[in-house]
Amino acid sequence: MKLNVDRIMSRYIFIVLILMLSGCSPVNRQKIRVESGLDYGESRDCILFPCPSIGLMGGCVSKKINLKTRQSEGVGYGIFDAMCWRSIDGGRNWTSQKLTDGALQELVVKDNIVYAVVNPKSNKWGYETFIYESRNFGADWTFKCGIKGSMVRLHVRDSNWMIGYIGYKLRETKDGGKNWHILKTSYRVLDEFYHGRYAYYLSYFKEPLQRDLLVRYDLYTGEEKMQRLPAGSNVAVGKENIIFVTKGKTDELDIYRINDDFSLSRLSTIKDGIPVFVRHVEIHADEIYMHVTFERESLFVADESFYYSPDCGKSWKKLGTMGHSRWYSDEVTRYVDDDGFKIVYNDDIYSINIFWN
């Protein structure tokens, strides 16, 4: 018995030493069981926990496909059903529900109403995006509205006032989706985020591939203010009133707060030895949870890592890595509680717990 214990302890010490030598702190990744596992043709693209016990995942499932011929029954390969998976026990067990054909791209909650953004594949009624809503946290869904153009993100201010990001432009409705119009912005919108009465969006000054221009758009008056980001900035991501800026090919990631007068205050800088790019950010009060990728020699090879800040970006703790990924994954964090936060990673759901020493 003692021999077995010694073997277990030796293996544990070996693993810890490897992690220390590699410069990575361990991530406690608890894989949460998903309904019946991931079947052929399933994809989960987003996750939302509107409350601690109820979780929702959005994605799509290929219609019944003959694996030999790669053909669906009557509709051809590549046609999908937009699906919503729902859990009522904190993410341990899931059931699925079909909304329509296509793919469920995003889940948003506002005032206890959940909104689902669906890109239908059949282009029903001339719409390229459907918006569904649920008033009981995903138990039932009703069609709310449709819009021409493929919507990437949806911002909900109330049940009538919504803003969608479509084709480098912002489109707005104030009547629940019956009518949409394009907001007149001075620059092409590459990415957008919201805080208070403002929509902030990123654009470029000269080089189209660089996000080195920050614009503040007043949603009530339409007034714009613009400023260039600090010299060397080429990739930026924003969330609420925080902006994360990568400097060229350096290994520096600067974190700034956008002040009320539209000035920037640098909160901190993260340096990790290789270029780091922010994939997704969640902010809860003063806590920030950030998912990043580290660029290797190949564009299609990346390390997935997570950072945590307890003081609104002034200091950071690297939680560790999810490992080596051939492709940049599209996982999305959507709920944070005392145990950490949950993500969809390579089509499976994990709970990431925090080690804060």
Image (cartoon, rainbow, N blue to C red):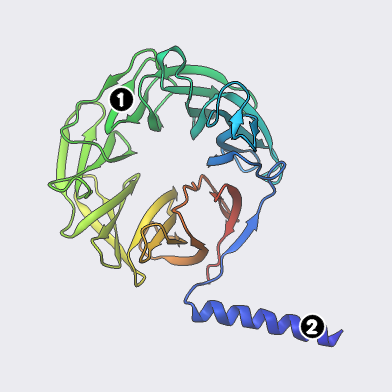
Q: Is residue 215 left or right of residue 55?
A: left
Residue 224: image quadrant is: top left
Q: Which mark is residue 255?
A: none
The percent coordinates of residue 341 (x first, y second) are 55, 52
Amino acid type, label 2: Val
Q: Which mark is residue 171?
A: 1
The percent coordinates of residue 207 (x first, y second) are 16, 48
Amino acid type, label 1: Arg
Residue displayed at 54% across by 30% down: 112
Q: Quadrant of the N terminus?
A: bottom right
Q: Secondary structure at mark 2?
A: helix
Q: Considering depth in this image, is 104 or 243 the residue closer to the camera? A: 104
Q: Which mark is residue 5?
A: 2
Res 246 visible? yes
The percent coordinates of residue 345 (x first, y second) are 54, 51
Residues under labels 1 and 2: Cα distance? 63 Å
Residue 44: image quadrant is: top right
Chain-order first, disc 1 or disc 2: 2
Residue displayed at 25% across by 37% down: 189
Q: Is residue 101 left or right of residue 269?
A: right
Q: Is residue 162 left or right of residue 181?
A: right
Residue displayed at 15% across by 59% down: 231
The percent coordinates of residue 187 (x first, y second) are 17, 36
Residue 31: image quadrant is: bottom right
Q: Residues within 10 Å of mark 2 (few under 14, many from 20)?
A: few
Q: Is residue 160 left or right of residue 112?
A: left
Looking at the image, the residue that sits furthest to the front is: 69
Res 62 visible? no
Q: Considering depth in this image, is 232 or 101 the residue closer to the camera? A: 101
Residue displayed at 21% across by 57% down: 233
Q: Secondary structure at mark 1?
A: strand
